[in-house]
């Protein structure tokens, strides 16, 4: 049965768009306070060293310097991290990567602070270091982090792997390497902190999780959380990278010690050097299928370089390993995933969260296997695709909203339509078509995850939604307003959504894991529905009818010819506000640590992408001629927002596929946008089609589920398959820079020559 | 440190006289001195384009221009683009085409697009992509930005 909705499902510009095009939206760095201090961070130049002594007196004496602070100035706990708090806010005795924070300088001007930074003397004893995660696993490797270099080992065990490979008619295996990737939000990290007359702390910040800012600042200052109030300002992108409130802690410590407002604003190079990244992986994977093209077994070893700190490494690795079989049913699985410490910049959450890396490996091997079996790549995919009866790698069966086979069928039509274009390849170029698929559990995988919303209806027929899932630009505030408006029969502009203030909005955990639509969307809907029930009951009493005979629309209630404004209804009942609280806590079971088996996600999102690429044989440069991104979103709450997310995720994936790679010399080597290359407008495929598949998720708000990361997940895989198809050599390392592809072409040329001679 | 220099510059149609440090960038001058915070700073090295403003009608990275260099010139920032509460057609198409996400690149992107359209009122899609290649956006994948600029060109050609 299809239900006609008034507000949800309609394309609608986001509620903050006008303030942004006018330049009026207030980001954190747009705020200044009287007597505000500027804070700079001294960072370790060494990848691994013991701090013998820090002398701050010379810096302290510089003109315009108000404070120089080190670890010993921290009144509470000196630790931070989005999940695992294994990083010191200011290093007390050890630095573990070149970029670790050692001291803070607070000055009257930014320039004064920068000058004084140079005058801090740190006596370091350099220690042996390791950058390569495979070397870090060797027995005599330098220890990058106390407790050993294996930060985490997560497993999946299903069936009998030996029996599975025994049944295989073809087996393929390879090692795949993926890059360390930077989020590259255009707004760098920034925080402003001040104290009020009672000594309570106010934080304004660019953040993905205002309540974590509050928790970390309170813990560092040994204050109750009730004395810290965080307001997330308009945030210039996050993509997973603004979940560790280091800038917030630095500003708070200075404000606390000096009594003056303090601002921390990273320049781009500091953001690139010190913010955590997406994990680079080394993946050894082996995949087998029987003669009929049924996958029989997969064996995988995933090594993620988590850098100096684990922060989110355990959760990222868990996401990877539980998604090792992608959109396929594979009866026999053995997968081991490790988060390995090295003396490099820490890695944590980034859009994709460990899925794009495994999708690249798996989808590449699917193509190789199809080749061995003499099957079309899409045919092999179709024969093994998950449906409502088959379990994924965690043993979870999704009873609904799993349109993989439908998507593959559509993909087949698209690929057929692209094939004639292969014949139009210009001289000096090679063309190829590639397909890539991905699956993603929505929300946290390692633990249950809850969202809470407080919705209030006012007598004038307006409503307020308080829900702590901050909007980073993805449009969730607009969608939450739509959800409440739909349920309460209001226009969207009568609903105000407040997600950004810890004093008003309840903690909903972080804006991450594609979880806001699914979790908070439901919480908002449930709370609004409770309000509606109360209003209808009150009206039914007035109209002397049954509640289900009352209509609630545009701030009024009606039954046949009788009508009442909400103001009148509230007045008759001496009411000034109706407030309801609701939450959504999907019933999940975290993966078992020994087998990875469980029911880790409330719902899953699926993506199938297709690319037609052209490779320049002279330079190795890859150009994307056509790209089709098919994404399953349940039902769309706002098609304009969905489309925007799919475009953005797809292009972020294009960076992962073609150009982005954070390099390490001592610390981060390429710390500018001139050397770390994210896609520009010129890198957009000549033709990009977004195809949204709507297959309602019964447990989601109005059938919706999360999708923001999914549009990135299969891009690396899709592009690698297309390029491999074009050049006739299997690509096993991303990004596919011109240089790398050129080398593959040259080696292939040499091999052909050798064979001829 | 050298002494501040006096400059006279027209900002968004208003004459401004100010004493600025010789090493102060135009971006800092706009943001800190004049509180025109619609101009955003994303990299300070001229790589991201978030701080794009118009200097004598041309798009510049205001982080790479010194305030003293604008003496006698005319600067347009995002705050100067709309008039009497009426959005510039570029601003309107950016809203209508779902072009705005986090919005941090938006002011620079709109001004970069304005410079492009002032010079080439009828750009091809390729022209638009090339013209905006110096303005980085991480949220939108550029697709709707390119579409919006094309739509704005149409509106502007129509004499609206």
Image (cartoon, coloured by chain):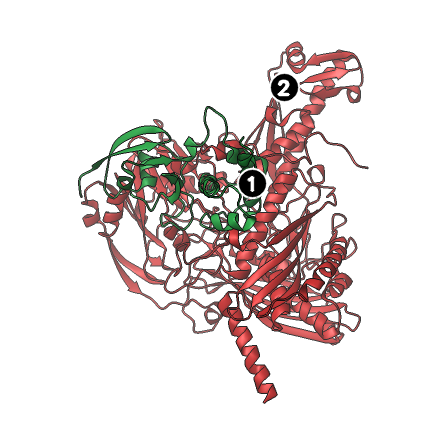
Q: Position of residue A650 (x, y in %)?
A: 59, 52
Q: Chain of mark 2?
A: A
- Could you tell me which residue is drawn at 64 percent across and 10 percent down? A571
Tell me where residue A53 appears, x and y as whole percent.
25, 56
Question: Residue A257, relative to residue A379: is it above or below?
Answer: above
Crowding at dot 1, Cα within 10 Å, few <14 / some 14-19 / many 20+, comes out as: many
Evaluate whether residue A403 shows in this view: yes
Quadrant position of residue A622 = bottom right
Taking the view exactly as shown, the residue that stands out farthest to the right is: A1
Tell me the residue that label 2 is attached to: A461
Q: Colour of chain A?
A: red
Task: Supply the letter of whichever chain is green.
Answer: B
Can you say which quadrant of the picture contains the N terminus of chain B?
top left
Q: Kindly report which numbered mark, 2 or 1, lies closer to the viewer in this rendering.
A: 1
Asked if residue A714 shows in the view, the reply is no
Name above or below for residue A195 compared with residue A253: above
Residue to which mark 1 is pinned: B148
């Amino acid at each position: 049965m299809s239900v006609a909705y008034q507000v949800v499902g309609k394309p609608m510009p986001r509620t903050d768009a006008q303030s942004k095009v006018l330049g009026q939206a207030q980001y954190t760095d747009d705020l200044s306070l009287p007597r505000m201090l500027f804070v700079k961070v001294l960072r370790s130049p060494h990848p691994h060293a013991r701090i013998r002594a820090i002398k701050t007196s010379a810096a302290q004496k510089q003109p315009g310097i108000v404070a120089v602070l080190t670890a010993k100035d921290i009144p509470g706990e000196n630790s931070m991290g989005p999940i695992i708090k294994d990083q010191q806010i200011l290093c007390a005795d050890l630095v573990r990567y070149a970029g670790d924070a050692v001291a803070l300088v607070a000055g009257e001007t930014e320039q004064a602070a920068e000058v004084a930074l140079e005058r801090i003397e740190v006596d370091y004893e350099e220690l042996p270091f390791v950058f390569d995660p495979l070397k870090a696993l060797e027995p005599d490797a330098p220890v990058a982090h106390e407790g050993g270099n294996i930060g985490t080992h997560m497993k999946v065990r299903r069936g009998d792997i030996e029996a599975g490979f025994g049944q295989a008619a073809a087996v393929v295996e390879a090692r795949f390497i993926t890059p360390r990737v930077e989020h590259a939000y255009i707004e760098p990290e920034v925080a402003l902190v001040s104290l009020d007359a009672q000594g309570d702390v106010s934080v304004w910040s660019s953040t993905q999780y205002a309540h974590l800012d509050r928790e970390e600042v309170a813990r560092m200052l040994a204050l109750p959380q009730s004395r810290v109030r965080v307001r997330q300002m308009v945030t210039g992108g996050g993509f997973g990278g603004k979940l560790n409130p280091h800038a917030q802690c630095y500003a708070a410590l200075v404000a606390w010690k000096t009594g003056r407002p303090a601002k921390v604003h990273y320049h781009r190079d500091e953001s690139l050097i010190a913010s955590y990244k997406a994990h680079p992986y080394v993946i050894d994977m082996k995949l087998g299928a029987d003669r009929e093209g049924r996958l029989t077994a997969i064996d995988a070893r995933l090594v993620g370089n988590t850098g100096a700190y684990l922060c989110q490494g355990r959760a990222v690795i868990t996401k990877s390993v539980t998604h090792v079989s992608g959109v396929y049913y594979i009866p026999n699985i053995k997968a081991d995933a490790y988060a390995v410490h090295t003396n490099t910049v820490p890695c944590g959450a980034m859009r994709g969260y460990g899925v794009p890396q495994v999708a690249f490996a798996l989808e590449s091997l699917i193509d190789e296997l199809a080749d061995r079996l003499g099957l079309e790549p899409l045919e092999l995919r179709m024969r093994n695709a998950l449906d409502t009866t088959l379990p994924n790698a965690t043993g979870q069966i999704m009873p609904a909203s799993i349109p993989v086979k439908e998507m593959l069928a559509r993909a087949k039509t698209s690929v057929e339509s692209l094939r004639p274009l292969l014949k139009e390849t210009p001289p000096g170029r090679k063309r190829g078509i590639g397909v890539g698929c991905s699956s993603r559990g929505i929300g946290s995988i390692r633990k249950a995850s809850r969202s809470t919303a407080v919705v209030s209806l006012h007598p004038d027929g307006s409503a307020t939604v308080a829900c702590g899932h901050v909007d980073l630009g993805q449009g969730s505030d607009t969608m939450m307003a739509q959800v409440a408006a739909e349920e309460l029969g209001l226009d969207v502009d009568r609903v105000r959504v407040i997600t950004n203030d810890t004093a008003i909005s309840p903690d909903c955990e972080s804006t991450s894991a594609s979880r806001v639509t699914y979790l908070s969307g439901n919480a908002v809907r449930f709370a609004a529905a409770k309000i509606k029930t109360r209003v209808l009951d009150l009206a039914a009493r007035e109209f002397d009818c049954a509640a289900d005979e009352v209509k609630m629309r545009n701030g009024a209630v009606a039954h046949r010819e009788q009508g009442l404004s909400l103001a009148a209804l509230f007045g008759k009942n001496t009411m000034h506000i109706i407030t309801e609280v609701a939450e959504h806590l999907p019933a999940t079971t975290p993966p078992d640590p020994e087998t990875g088996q469980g029911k880790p996600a409330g719902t899953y999102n699926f993506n199938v992408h297709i690319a037609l690429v052209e490779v320049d044989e002279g330079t190795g440069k890859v150009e994307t001629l056509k790209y089709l991104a098919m994404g399953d979103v349940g039902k769309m709450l706002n098609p304009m927002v969905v489309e925007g997310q799919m475009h953005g995720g797809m292009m972020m994936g294009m960076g992962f596929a073609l150009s982005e790679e954070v390099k390490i010399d001592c610390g981060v080597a390429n710390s500018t946008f001139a050397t770390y290359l994210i896609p520009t407008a010129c890198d957009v495929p000549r033709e990009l089609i977004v195809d949204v598949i709507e297959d309602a998720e019964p447990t989601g708000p109005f059938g919706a589920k999360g999708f923001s990361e999914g549009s990135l997940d299969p891009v690396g895989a899709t592009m690698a398959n297309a390029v491999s198809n074009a050049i006739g050599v299997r690509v096993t390392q991303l990004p596919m820079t011109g240089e790398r592809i050129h080398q593959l072409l040259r080696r292939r040329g040499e091999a052909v020559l050798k064979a001829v001679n | 440190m050298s002494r501040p220099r006096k400059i006279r510059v027209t900002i968004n149609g208003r004459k401004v006289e100010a004493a600025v440090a010789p090493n102060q960038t135009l971006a800092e001058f706009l943001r800190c001195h004049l509180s025109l915070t619609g101009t955003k700073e994303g990299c300070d090295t001229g790589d991201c384009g978030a701080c794009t403003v118009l200097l004598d009608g041309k798009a510049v990275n205001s982080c790479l221009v010194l305030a003293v260099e604008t003496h006698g010139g005319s600067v347009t920032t995002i705050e100067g683009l709309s008039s009497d509460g009426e959005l510039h057609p570029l601003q309107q198409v950016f809203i209508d085409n779902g072009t705005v996400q986090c919005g941090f690149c938006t002011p620079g992107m709109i001004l970069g697009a304005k410079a492009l359209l002032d010079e080439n009122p009828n750009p091809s899609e390729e022209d638009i992509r090339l013209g905006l290649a110096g303005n980085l956006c991480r949220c939108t994948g550029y697709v709707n930005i390119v579409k919006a600029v094309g739509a704005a060109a149409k509106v502007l050609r129509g004499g609206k």
